[in-house]
Image: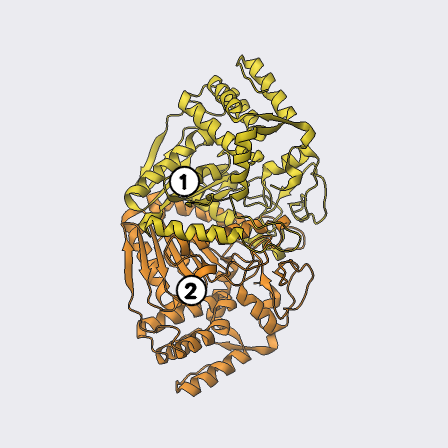
Chain colours: A yellow, B orange
Amino acid sequence: MLERFKVPEKDRVYVPEASIRAATEAVFRQAGLDDRGARQSADVLITNDLRGVESHGISNQLRNYLRMYGEGALNPRPDIKVARETDTTAVVDADGGLGIHVAPDGMRMAIEKAKKHGTGTVAVIKAGHLGGAGYHASLATQENMIGQAMAAPGGGQTLPTFGAEPRFGTHPVAWAAPARNQPPFLFDVATTQVAGNKIQLAKRVGADLEPAWIANMDGEPILDRVPVPQSYYQLPFGGTRENSSHKGYGMMAMIDIMCNSMTGVGAGFLTGGGGQLFVATDVQAFIDLDEYFDWMDQFLEGLRNTKPASGHERVLYPGLSEWEETQERSSNGIPYHREVIEWFESYAAEVGVEVNLR
Amino acid sequence: MLERFKVPEKDRVYVPEASIRAATEAVFRQAGLDDRGARQSADVLITNDLRGVESHGISNQLRNYLRMYGEGALNPRPDIKVARETDTTAVVDADGGLGIHVAPDGMRMAIEKAKKHGTGTVAVIKAGHLGGAGYHASLATQENMIGQAMAAPGGGQTLPTFGAEPRFGTHPVAWAAPARNQPPFLFDVATTQVAGNKIQLAKRVGADLEPAWIANMDGEPILDRVPVPQSYYQLPFGGTRENSSHKGYGMMAMIDIMCNSMTGVGAGFLTGGGGQLFVATDVQAFIDLDEYFDWMDQFLEGLRNTKPASGHERVLYPGLSEWEETQERSSNGIPYHREVIEWFESYAAEVGVEVNLR
């Protein structure tokens, strides 16, 4: 994460992982989820927070989720049904469950299919917010598989290249691949220039946006460094056509097709979208695991050991700094903005749940 | 394609599709390929030329391929073997055949598996240049499937974000999806800021490169508009970190993992790479074809009809302008640079093949 998005030192409250996990599970149970559902949902948020992916953790997401449970917009006890199934594929109707609650089981189903047939591809429809794609893709690496997760939420945020009307959300995608001695590879991104939640984070910490991160309401990319304006559209990664925004746009469109048109949800900008897709690919269908691990460790080591460009300390690979952050935060606690902890405590008090965050 | 990459009007020679196709098949046969191989190889190049993807057609590629056949660096009569296979996956050893010759059969194998099991994933190893990923992905749409193709050639061209040593080639990827009334969707890109061959094209037509398209030999992105310098490295799409180059880098790394580490070829920057991967996903495993087509046509129409940003005439979707170009060029001939036609004629004369290009 870019430095300016971090919680400023003076505003940090460090909370031990076990405390925030217990508290989060408790408020999810209070919202109506069963034990397993509450544990699963909390695990997505806390895993993101441990990785330093604040945009998809407690700070930005939990209060939205709880509000939606409160309003009846999410189903805490969904009756999940398989709508269509083949050897290697399925469409799962999640009955209005929250993505962080139900989607991991979609990926687990893909993994089971891949164990038998080499690959598994499972779509989850009628589910709420996925909570980032990375968590879900990573489940596959625990089974020595390559995992892919994507989601196509809505159509009201992001412009197609040369467009002045939004057609996409942030359309996240993640690929995860296991390694033996090196931390696993985890490429986990929004296909916008910047994750939608990061704009909210920037607002909270008073950070400027970079050139070509967003467009004005006429569809023109804003090429100056500016504070977050009142209204704006997001741009596909690349930002401008000369900077390859058509590549971000194309990825978004493909994600929308696979998650929405291919699953019967229908184009995100016409229906609200929300389809999610999970793919597991068993490494051993292609190569002996030992040989794969030999290559992966050499590959990831080679990337880390790349000579850095001047002005840079080192070369990272996707997932490396998040893995390091996880080690750090598991030991020393997760730094939350004091405002987030104050909100959590007051919410818990209001609904009569006991939490211990300090 | 950006305007400045087109062949200047005064240098154009329009050649009918049938003429350039017959001539290309003839020189491939002369290079030692059998009839089917020559037809297949020519079809990839001519399809790219029809689509306006000059970087992967006759102009940039054919003379390299013929030189390599001449030097014995490519095998015109490969003995293709399946190295490993499951219901839904295979690794195919292409025995040194050229990618445009052998890779389409890899995709066809993936399609056959998808017909039986919902999806198919086939890796092709020990093959030469793929000739762009789009052609191969598109084969799936003819069978009402979604196609994906990717390749991880070499490791000496493109820097990882913050790096000063190259670790990747141009690592192309394509996704293709069928539609009923709208031209099919085809997202077909290099994961660099710009395809390697486009830099050669820019050199030929004397066009400048855009800011952050390439880096100097110390790994610093060149932020000015400059002619193509003598030596340079390429950058992942995004160009700079602030412009999301870590997204291009992550895609490249994932493509390298799936094409090279997962197939036993080994990391591109350590071994030279060259693995290729083809995925076919049968739409009907997820949804009835009619319902899919209804959504796809609405989706693609909605993208085309997006209100354009000021200064732009219309919004495209990936594959649309290439489809229009194909209609145009099928009728009126393919515009080649006179230099290319002169080369073709003199090569044909030299090897004793009769061609009729004017």
**Element at label 2:** loop
Tell me if residue B262 comes above or below residue A116 in the rendering: below
Which x, y percent locates residue A232? 66, 40
Position of the N terminus of chain B by quadrant? bottom right
Tell me if residue B263 comes above or below residue B209 in the rendering: above
Relative to the observer, which residue lies in front, B33 or B67? B67
Q: Residue at x 52, y 35 (%)?
A: A327
Find residue A232 and name its label: none
Query: Whole-Å distance between the Cαs marked 2 and 1?
Result: 33 Å
Q: Residues within 10 Å of mark 1 (few under 14, many from 20)?
A: many
- In the displayed structure, does residue A132 sit left or right of residue B139? right
Which amino acid type is marked by label 1?
Gly
Find residue A264 and name its label: 1
Q: Nearer the viewer, mark 2 or mark 1?
A: 2
**Element at label 1:** loop
* Same chain for the residues under marks 2 and 1 in the image: no
Which x, y percent locates residue A24? 51, 23
Q: Residue at x 35, y 36 (%)?
A: A109
Relative to the observer, which residue lies in front, A115 or A210? A115
Which amino acid type is marked by label 2?
Leu
Find residue B130 and name its label: 2
Q: Residues within 10 Å of mark 2 (few under 14, many from 20)?
A: many
Which x, y percent locates residue B28? 38, 76
Q: Residue at x 44, y 25 (%)?
A: A39
